[in-house]
Amino acid sequence: MKIYWQGQEPINAEVVLDLLRAIYGEVELLPGPAGADLCLYLSFEREGQQIRVQTEICQEGQSELVWLERELHRAEEDYNGLRRICRLALLEALLPFAEAGKLPWGVLTGIRPTKIVHRMLAAGYQPGEIRDLLQTGYGLTAEKAGLLLQVALSQRPLLARQEREQKRIGIYIGIPFCPTKCLYCSFPSYPLARWQKWTEPVLAALLKEMAALGEQVRELGLTVESIYVGGGTPTSLDARELRQLMTGIEQALLQPGTEEFTVEAGRPDTINREKLQLLRAAGVNRISINPQTMNEATLQKIGRAHTPDQVVECVRLARQMGFPVLNMDLIIGLPGEGREELEATLASIRELAPENLTVHTLALKRASLLAEAKRQGQSLELASAEEAEALLARVYRYAEEEGLEPYYLYRQKQMVGALENVGFAVPGKACLYNIQMIEERQTILGLGAGAGSKWVRPDYTLVNTYNPKDPIAYLERIDEVIVRKKQALQELFG
């Protein structure tokens, strides 16, 4: 879709481009109206807290004016409110002319929509007011408004504790290696077939970083609330290397007050009894075993070198070891999957009864093999927006049937159907790290190649920093990484 945009400052093309893409998919902005499939003109006037927006739509020689009036609310700054209302006016004006149906998340295209609800709660809005405002002021459907409110309310006790105890931090430890790269993945992960000789030196650098930063954490009197070992695939390390990693964590980072210790054992083909035993002995109390789907044909198609039977066996072993919380990840909208495949997967998951279930909507990430296949014109058999929404709705019904409640939520660019990723948990078993990481109310110290740190100040402004993604660059710069991170910890908590 070729579009010419003319807006009244400060509502320029940058303000609306992501919304236009959510409506039309591929969008090219033109410098003038010549050659445009669609011309859009937006202006506004303000009186007190009221904003009145005029949108003119010109298409195929026809022109139409659409007016919308809304009020700024007290939980937002003026510019953000103006931006919100103008985006809503554009959305309301365009939807009757667009082939796509109503966007379930309205004008919200960001990663962390729960932050908006937390700001409203802090400003004194009641839940009913928030639900109404999400629908009338942001364009959410009733279902998404209710979901967002439910998730935010479930998080309030944990976030309130963080406000009282600001010396609590989380730790993320990244292992960049994977057995293979999955079709949909864009994360910086390095296949073991090519990187096997680098696992030991990278692990040694990580142990050095953990020891140095762990000492700093203790000196500053910080409480490590949660530890999350992700990647990549941490269990792609062999048993000896994994034992070294666990010993390093126990010695440098694990504290009596650490409430949650998660390891992503995501790929069942990397898990065995010995590895599970050493993880449990090290104090791991939450483990992820991630099938993504329980349909073998799909697993082969997306590059997962394991079978559904291996998933079942890994879960059986994990239950024998006594891990208190098991998480399982699913992806909605994988190539070739529809209602029948989802029902088969959910039936299998029901038998395994995980305490946590994390459901992702497929995202066509630019760096993924899947996106490259699409760019090359390959037939991918992907779900339509309507199909994906119906599949996700079925997952919500399943979660309710199984007594699982949504506890964290985030969104990504290029998601099928412009939907969401959501984590469900048995009451009392929500993942602390996931909540703190998404809501950005707690400093997260990232260790390892490619790991990101979130430095959260007392006023909840934050700075993100990242370790080198490439394992060799991480090795070469490890001393610099340690010095800079220790300085950042000292500045924030010293």
Image (cartoon, helix red, strand yellow):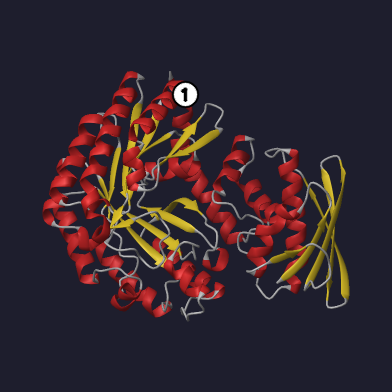
Residue 165 in view here: no
Location of residue 190 (image quadrant): bottom left
For image coordinates 52% across by 28% down, the residue present is 457
For the residue marked with disc 1, what is the amino acid?
A: Leu
For image coordinates 33% across by 47% down, the residue present is 471
What x and y, as percent, mark residue 473?
Answer: 36, 43
Q: Nearer the viewer, residue 344 or 60?
A: 60
| 334 shown above or below 20 | below
What x and y, as percent, mark residue 88?
Answer: 73, 56
- In-image side of 285 versus 388 (left or right): left
| 182 shown above or below 122 | below
Pointer 1: what residue? 492
Q: Quadrant of the C terminus?
A: top left
- In-image side of 435 versus 142 (left or right): left
Residue 140 in view here: yes
Label 1, secondary structure: give it.
Answer: helix
Q: Nearer the viewer, residue 231 or 177?
A: 177
What x and y, as percent, mark residue 318?
Answer: 18, 55
For image coordinates 71% across by 73% down, the residue present is 98
What x and y, as percent, mark residue 2?
Answer: 73, 70
